[in-house]
Amino acid sequence: MILHLAMNPDTQKQLKITDITAQKLDKLNIRTAWDAVLHLPLRYEDETHITPIADAPVGVPCQVEGTVIHQEVHFKQRKQLVVQIKDGSEKILFLRFIHFYASHQKQMAKGKRIRAVGEIIHGFLCAEMIHPKIRDAESGGLAESLTPVYPTVNGLNQPTIRRIIETALGSVSLHDTLPDELLSRLKLPHLAESLRLLHAPPPDYTIHQLADGALPAWQRLKFDELLAQQLSMRLARQKRVNGQAQPLRGTGELADKLLHALPFALTGAQQRVLAEIRADMLQHYPMHRLLQGDVGSGKTIVAALAALTAIEAGAQVAVMAPTEILAEQHYLKFKQWLEPLGVNVSWLSGSLRKKSKEQAKVALAGGETLLAVGTHALFQDDVQFQNLGLVIVDEQHRFGVAQRLALKNKGADVHQLMMSATPIPRTLAMSFFADLDVAVIDELPPNRTPIKTRLVNSVRRAEVEGFVLNTCRKGQQAYWVCPLIEESETLQLQTATETLAQLQLALPELAIGLVHGRMKAAEKAEVMAAFSSGRLNVLVATTVIEVGVDVPNASLMVIEHAERMGLAQLHQLRGRVGRGAAASACVLLFAEPLSELAKARLKVIYEHTDGFEIARQDLNIRGPGEFLGARQSGVPMLRFANLEEDLPLLEAARNIAPLLIEERPDIVEAHLNRWLSSREQYLGA
Ligand code: ADP
Ligand code: MG
């Protein structure tokens, strides 16, 4: 068997560990001695004194000592060892072990005096501890200070990991990367002192004190982490600004033609952001700009005009969207707008047949196609552009990590415009998105009829069907969104087909189509085209239509089991209507009973239409990590710092980072070396 070892042999020697242990540590992301030093306790156990069994509180870790009065192995559902101990307090405590060896039986033989550390729970008959830590009472005195408990994996026990960390602490230089003057100004302790305190707390510290993030030792670690993040973001920015991109100065010719052909005029906000984007594109380094605007604020036309500027300047443009449906919508829109101007637009997606794909690729490489729209297939290795100058990415946060990296590599020297309807909270903008310039469309196009939102109990479904019929009889169209079933795609599909059948039965007069995630791209496109052109009155859909679909004649949105959906999702879905002249409505069907969380969400979506306000409320309800789906989207998570709680530290780190970069590159290098472990990727935006 070949062992995969991420840890290098020298480190292994330094930490005095075997290959097997190195592999276990790898699972904990510990690959260097520094990684081990930064592996901080999850909590602490108090083995400094003994609590009488009768006084031991339920659910709080404690240490008891007693004599074994009974031991037996049960074979009930599962083989288990049950030991009873008793101290002077006349109460019996049961100790239960599901995993045990003969050595445990010996250690806890009848008559032995032992210590057990664990949490007491109320068992079937009496107090018990499950899998407590056991020690021979005679083997030694009590601990002098609190015992750290580390995050670990199967097969790596606490004493081992404690020993490894102790070794690591003794083998790395704990020399401080930050100057004393700075530390005293920020009232932060030295790193060495902080680490030693957390790994081996002095006797006078309590569990409560050590768990408090405001403890100076924790503050120091959080600060270092935030500083590393700020430094790496700033350096990424610097690298970009020192990079090369072709300045794209348009003639305005094509863009003006498109503006004249449009049935509407740009809003003031659209003009402003377009000017910002164009100014960025004139730079000799790559633009990295996020265009934010609520659902329906008109980001697409801004993107198209920016694309024309690039094309006027002789460059090619790639437009990328996270889903086939959205990409296809963009393709149709761009084609409709650009082809009359003589600009060739092509379509590239993973599901395209081989021959069409080859053709599209040849046209791109040869420069006949000036604009390509597609999914992440656009950034596959074998897609070559003759002269790519601008990349436009819609709903960028929905792409996976690998795709974002591919984009980052391919797009290193081109201008990038990202678009998103998800507002970024200030703290996130200050940290993870630090290398991103943001432009906001803060105004909706005029003459939008406000969308009426109604909450309707699902027992009144028949009335809602009647409402759909009336709407369609007036020549308008409706969406009907199926219940979300997160657990199973198969069930989701089944529900979608059932919903379709049910509606067809109830509304025989209407042409009803279905679009769902499992459909082939061509089928999806066909249904979408039928709906766009008005051949279908009603579109039954799973949440695949959540982002970007634009059919102005649709004026009714029905969402089934709205209580299961998140706020962002509901807002996006509702934003599919209210785009044309007709008064629009959104019906949220809900089924009782409603959880408190569901009630809170429905109240917010009912009361608010402004996406930024909804996002703020959403953030309140869910917290920032959940909010952005940060883990999935590859935004690196902070290990110690918490953006909301540690805002003052974040601000301090943000202020100091540029000064350090300017004046003390030696500190910057040392700090980043220490804090950015080999695999950690600070992806930037
Ligand atoms: P989003 O920002 O959600 O991507 P879209 O770009 O899809 O929004 O625009 C929503 C709708 O508004 C589209 O039908 C678009 O053509 C239309 N639109 C965009 N800008 C204007 C404007 N200035 N005046 C009127 N309608 C507009
Ligand atoms: Mg859009």
Image (cartoon, helix red, strand yellow):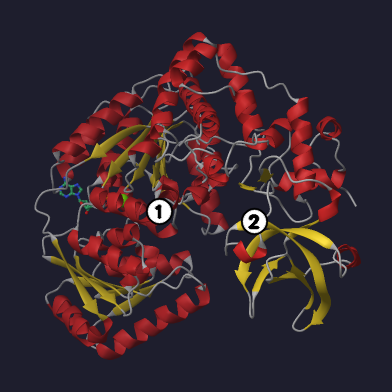
Q: Is residue 679 visible?
A: no
Neighbours of disc 2 within 10 Å: few (<14), some (14-19), many (20+): many
Q: Between marks 1 and 2, how big is the CA–CA gap?
A: 58 Å
Q: Is residue 140 visible?
A: yes
Q: At x 40% / y 21%, what residue is drawn? A: 655
Neighbours of disc 1 within 10 Å: few (<14), some (14-19), many (20+): many
The answer to whether 539 is drawn above or below residue 360 in the figure is below
Toward the left, the furthest residue is 447
> Where, by quadrant of the figure, is residue 560 drawn?
bottom left
Left or right, residue 529 beside residue 122: left
The answer to whether 667 is drawn above or below residue 515 in the figure is above
Which residue has dot 1 on it?
Answer: 327
Percent position (x, y) of residue 227?
50, 26
> Where, by quadrant of the figure, is residue 543 drawn?
bottom left
Considering depth in this image, is 9 or 380 the residue closer to the camera?
A: 9
Q: At x 59% / y 38%, what residue is drawn? A: 205
User: Is label 1 within 8 A of ligand 2 (CB to nearest ligand atom)?
Assistant: no
Percent position (x, y) of residue 422?
33, 48
Left or right, residue 265 beside residue 316: left
Left or right, residue 198 beside residue 610: right
Q: At x 36% / y 82%, what residue is drawn? A: 499
Amino acid type of disc 1?
Ala
Considering depth in this image, is 520 or 98 the residue closer to the camera?
A: 98
Which label is found at residue 630?
A: none
* SS at circle 1: helix
* SS at circle 2: strand
Percent position (x, y) of residue 464?
20, 81
Which residue has dot 2 on it?
Answer: 62
Q: Circles 1 and 2: CB distance less than 8 Å?
A: no
Considering depth in this image, is 102 or 390 the residue closer to the camera?
A: 102
Amino acid type of disc 2?
Cys
Q: Earlier in the sequence, mark 1 or mark 2?
A: 2
